[in-house]
Amino acid sequence: MSIELRMAWRNVWRNPRRTWLTVAAIAFACLVLVFMLSFQLGSYASMIDSSVKIEAGHLQVQAEGYQDDREMRQVVRDPAAVERALSGIPEIEAFTRRASAFAVVSSEDRTYGALVIGVDPVHEPEVSSLESLVREGSFLSSTGSSSGTGGDGALVGELLARNLQVGLGDELTVIGQGRDGSVAATVLVVRGIFSSGIDDFDRSAVHMPLATFQEVFAMGDAVHEVVAVGRDLWDVPEIVRRLRGALAGISQTPPLVVLDWNELMPGLLQSIQVDLVSGLIFYVALILVVAFSILNTFLMAFLERTRELGVMMAIGTTPGRLGRLLLLESLFLTGVGIAVGIALGCAVTLYFQVHGIDVSGANELLARFGISGRMYPRLSVLSALVGPLLVLVVTGAAALYPALKIRRLRPVEALTHV
Amino acid sequence: MSDMSEALARFGVYLRIAWRNLWRNRRRTAVILTAIVLGVWSMILLGALMRGLAEEMVENGIRTLTGHVQIHAERYRSDPVAAHPIRDPEAVTATIREVLGPGARWVSRVRVPVVVDTARKTGGATLVGIDVEREPELSFIGPDAIVDGRFLEPGEAGAVVVGRALLDEMETELGHKLVLLAQDAHDASVSRAFRIVGVYRAELEATEKQYLFVSKEAADGWLALDGAVSEIAVELADHRQAEGAARKLRAALVADGVGGEDGQPFQVASWRELLPVQRAVLDIFEGFVQLWYVVVFIAMGFGVVNTILMAIFERVRELGLLRALGMRPGAIVVEVLMEAVMMLLIGAAAGNLLGWASVAALAVHGIDLSAMAAGMELAGLSRVVYPVVTRSDLLLANGVVLILGVVVSLYPAVKASRFTPVEAMRQG
Amino acid sequence: METTNRSAVTTAAIALAALGLAFGVGIGPPARADDAPEAGVLVRAAFEHYRGDASVGTADMTIHRPGWERTMAMRVWTEGDADSLVRITAPAKDEGNGTLKKGTDMWLFNPKVNRVIKLPPSMMSQSWMGSDFSNNDLAKTDSLVNDYVHEIHATESRDGHTVYQVRSTPKPEAPVVWGSLELEIRDDHVLLAERFFDEDGALVKELTTSEIGELGGRVLPATLRMQKAESPGEWTELHYQKLSFPDSLPERVFTLTNLRTPED
C-alpha cells in the first residue's frame, strides 16, 4: 500500500508546472467559495441583527394579542418579574421596557397622528440602535420631572419632524387616551431627531421617557413590551424555550407570550433565503467551469503514460491496482488544491472579518436592512468547508473518469502506443 | 504591396497550421472547449439573471406611478397636497413637446393623501386621479391590472379602483363604498363617498395598500382644482436617458418662464432621484456582474494555460526543428497564439449561442419566485425574474474572455518559441 | 397604511343629539300609508324635538369595556345644526377638558398642558374622549341633513303610542359609511332606537333610549346607550340630568376663549 502512495505522490510531481496550475485552479475555486459563503452568512447575521436592533430586538415579552391589536389595556403587568426571569438566562445580554400609544401630536402649525413610545433612556441604548440613529440633537435623558411642565424631551422621526415643521427646541403637544380611558396629555420639547431609513418608522414615531409616559397615560408600573437581545443571534431559539418555562410562573390576564424576531419581522428570514438560494446557483456554475478546466490534467495523466501503464500491466499489475494508483494521484492533486484553497480562503476572510468591507456607496439600499458603512464576512466551520466539499465531490468525479478507463486498457495496445 | 500579400500568405499558412494543431488531440481540445463554453454561458445567463432582477426592480418602481421624469410645483415635494398644484399644466406640456419632440409621452395626475373610512375601519392612503386612457400606457394600472370588477371609464365620477390588499385590510368588498376625506385646493376639508368598481393587483402588496385610483375629472371636481394637476410624469424610451432629459427639461422650463405662481421654478426630478433604493440596486448589480465575469475567467484561465502548455510540450521536437530550419521565434509565438485565439473564439461562440438560447427561453415565462413572496416583498423585488442582456454586458463578457485569454496564452506561446534545436533532439 | 378599528369608534346621530349636537335630516319621498306622516317630516320633527334652536345640558357618560368602566360628568351647549361645546366637569383628572365644534372644524382643549389643538381631518374618525363616539360625527352632522333619503316602512303600537319604523338610505355620493339606518320614532317625536347597518345589511351598532320622562319641558329619554353589535361587552351610556332649551345662546359661548376659560 505504501508503495502505491509513494508512487502516486511522485507521479503527481512529475510535471510540477502542470500540477501547480491545476492546484491553482482548484484553490481559486475554493477561495472564492469560502470567502463568498462567509460573506453571505456574515451579512445575514449582521442584516438580521441590524434590522431587529432598530426596534424589534431578538425577542419580546408581551401580553397575548398585543402584537395584533395594540390595545392600551393589553399590558405586561409586572415587568420586574419578567426581567427577573430574563436575568436568570445567561445568554441574554440586555433588556429594556417599552410602552406605546397612538396619540395626536401637535406643533405650532400642524397636527398629526403618531405613535408615542415610552422608552427607558438608560437601558434602551443597550438593546436597540435607536441612540445611534440620532441625526440631530441628542438621545433622551431620564428626568425625574413628571409634572409635564415642558421639561421632558422627545426624540422625533425625521419625516414626522418635517411634517410637523419642528426642529430642536420646538414644543410638541401630545394628547391621547390613557390606559384607564382618561385623557392623557403632555407637552414635550424636541431634543433629538432620528432617521432609521425605514420610512414608516420615521414618519410616525415619537419617543419619550418611559417614566413620564407611564404617568401621563395612567399605566402605573405596567408596560407593553419587554424587549431583549441575546449575545448571539443563534442562541435565540434556546433562550425563547427557557424563557417560556420561566414565565409560566407569572400569571396575568391576558397571559404573557414570548415572540422571537422572526415573528416580529416576518419576511426578513425569507429575503435571506432568497439570497442564499441565488448564491448557490452561482457557486454551482463556478465549480462546473473549474471541473472542466482541470479535467485535461487528469486525462493527460492517463493518456500520455499509456506505454508506461502498458508496461506495468505486462509485468503483472492488475487493472484494479492501476486504477487505484490513478485515483490516488488525482486525490492527492485535488487534496493539495483544496487544502491551499481553504487556507487562503480562511486567511482572506479573516482579514476582512477584522477590517470589514466598505459598502457605504449602497447606503440607501442597506438602510432598509439596517446596515451601513461596513460589512463583515463571518468565517465558520460551515462556510469554510461546504464550498470546498462541493469542489471535492465534483473534481473527484472528474478524476474518476480516467481511473475507470484504465480497466479497458489492453497491455499490447498500450505497449505499442506512440 | 508585395510585402502585404506576402504577409497575408504567411498569415494564411499559420492559420492552417494552427487549426490543424488544435485538432491533433481532439479529446483534449474538446474538454477545454467545454470549460470555455460553460464559462461563457454562465457569464451571460447568470449575469443576465442578475441584471434582470435589478432592472425589474427599477422598472417596477418606474411603473408604479413614478415615470422616468416627474415635474412638480416646488412646494408639492415637501407638502404633497392639493393646495400645491401645477396650475397651468398646458404650459409645461408645451415645453415637454418642445424639448423631447412631438412624440413625447407624458401624463398628468392628481395625487393627494386621503383618509379612508368604511363602516368598521379607518386608515390612510393616497388618491390618484388619472387620465383613464393614457395612464395605462405608462404605468402598471390599467384594465390589465384589474382582477375583479372593471377599470374606470374616462371622466367617470364617483367610482374608485382599489388594490386587493387594501380591500382586505379595510374589510370591505367590491361594490361597496369608501368614504374619502381630503384637503381640497383651498385647504378646506372635503369628503365624499366613492363606489369600488374594480380591484387591482400590483407587484408589491405595499402598492396595493397605498393607491386608490379615480378619474382625473372626478378628483378635479371633488378637490376644486379647476384644471390644475399635482404632477406630470414623462416616459422615455430607456431609463438610462432620464438624467439627461431631466436636465434639459429643467433648463427649458426656466428659459420658457414656466414656473409656479410663487415665482419658484418647478421641480424636475429623474427616477434616480425619486427612487434611491432602486438606483442603488442597479449600481450594485452592475458591479456584481463585472466581478462575476472576472471570477469565471480566472477559473477557466488556468485550464486554458495548462492545456496549451500540454500541447506545446508534446511538440518540443517539432518546434525545435522549426527553429533549426530558421523560423523566427516571433512567428512561433504568433502561431501558438492563433491556436489559443481559435480555441477561445469557438468556445466563446458556442457559449454565446447557448447563452442567447437560454435567455430567450427564460424570457418567455421568467423564473417564478412567488414561493418566497414575503421575502421578495421586503427586499422590494417582484415575484418573477426575467433575464436581461445589454450590449455592454455582451461586449464585456466576450472582451474579458478573448483579450485576457490571449494575454494569459502569451506565457505558453513565449515558452514554445524558446525551444532550442538541442532540446528538440533530446526529446526524441 | 395604518388602520384603526372603528368598533372602538362609532356613534349615532341621535347620540350626538343627546349631546346636544345636530343630526341630519333629509326630506324623503312620501310615506306609504295615506294617513301616516311623511318620513322626512317625521324625522325632522323628532330631531327638532330633541334639539331645539339651542340647548344647555348636564349629563354623565359611562364607558364600559370588558374589565373596566368609567364615568365622566359634563356640560353641553349646542346651537343650530353645527355648533357645540362640551366641557368635562368630573372626575378631577379630566376636569376642564373640552371640545368645540364650529361648522366642520373641531378643537380640543386640555387644561393640564393648557393648549388648544385643532383636530386634523385624519383624526376625525378617532374616538371622542375614549368613548364610542367619534369626532367625525360631530363634524359631519350638518352634512347629514342632505345625505339620507327616509321612508316609513312599518308602523306598530307600543305602550299606547304609535311607533314608526323609518328606513334611511344614504344618497349615492354622500360621505357616510353606512349601508342603511333604521330609526324607531314615536308619535310624540321621541326617538326610541337607531340602528346602523353596513352595506351587506349586517348590524354594526345600535343606539337605544330609555327612561322617557320630562326634560326641559319636553318629553324626552334621559338615557341613551350606544352598543356595538359585534362586541357586547363594549358600550357607552349617556344620561341626562338637566336639559333646557333657550331660544338662543350668546355668541361668545362657541369661541376658543370660552373653550379655554369657562365663564359659566
Image (spheres, coloured by chain):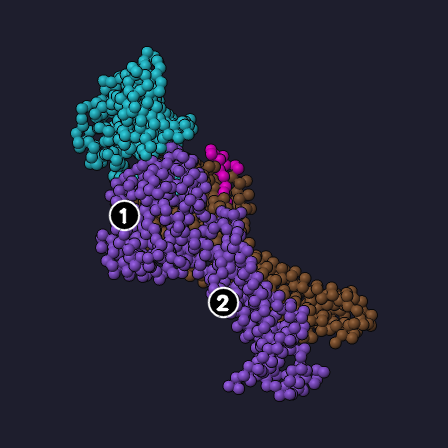
Chain colours: A brown, B purple, C cyan
- Label for residue C33? none
Q: Nearer the viewer, mark 2 or mark 1?
A: 1
Kindly identify which chain the residue marked by label 1 belongs to: B
Q: Are marks 2 and 1 on the same chain?
A: yes
Q: Residue at x 63, y 86 (%)?
A: B323
Q: Secondary structure at mark 2?
A: helix
* Kind of residue indicated by mark 1: Ala
Give the quadrant of residue A35: bottom right
Q: Quadrant of the C terminus of chain B?
A: bottom right
Q: Is residue B347 left or right of residue A364?
A: right
Mark 1 is surrounded, within 10 Å at the Cα level, by few (under 14), some (14 to 19) or many (20 or more) other residues, namely: many
Part of the protein shown in magenta: A248-260
User: Horizontal and vertical percent for residue A301?
Assistant: 70, 71
From the image, give the main secondary structure of the stretch colored magenta.
Answer: loop
- Find out whether residue A259 is within the magenta segment: yes
Is residue A226 or residue B323 the one in the foreground? B323
Give the quadrant of residue B316: bottom right
Circles 2 and 1, Cβ within 8 Å, touching? The answer is no
Q: Residue at x 41, y 46 (%)?
A: B142
Kindly identify which chain the residue marked by label 2 belongs to: B
User: Horizontal and vertical percent for residue C226?
Assistant: 36, 26
Can I make out residue A24 in this image? no
User: Horizontal and vertical percent for residue A370?
Assistant: 44, 53
Q: CA distance from mark 2 to mark 1?
A: 48 Å
Write down the residue under mark 2: B396
Q: Is residue A316 above or below residue B11?
A: above
- Label for residue B228? 1
Q: Secondary structure at mark 1?
A: loop
Q: Residue at x 55, y 46 (%)?
A: A238
Q: Residue at x 24, y 23 (%)?
A: C48
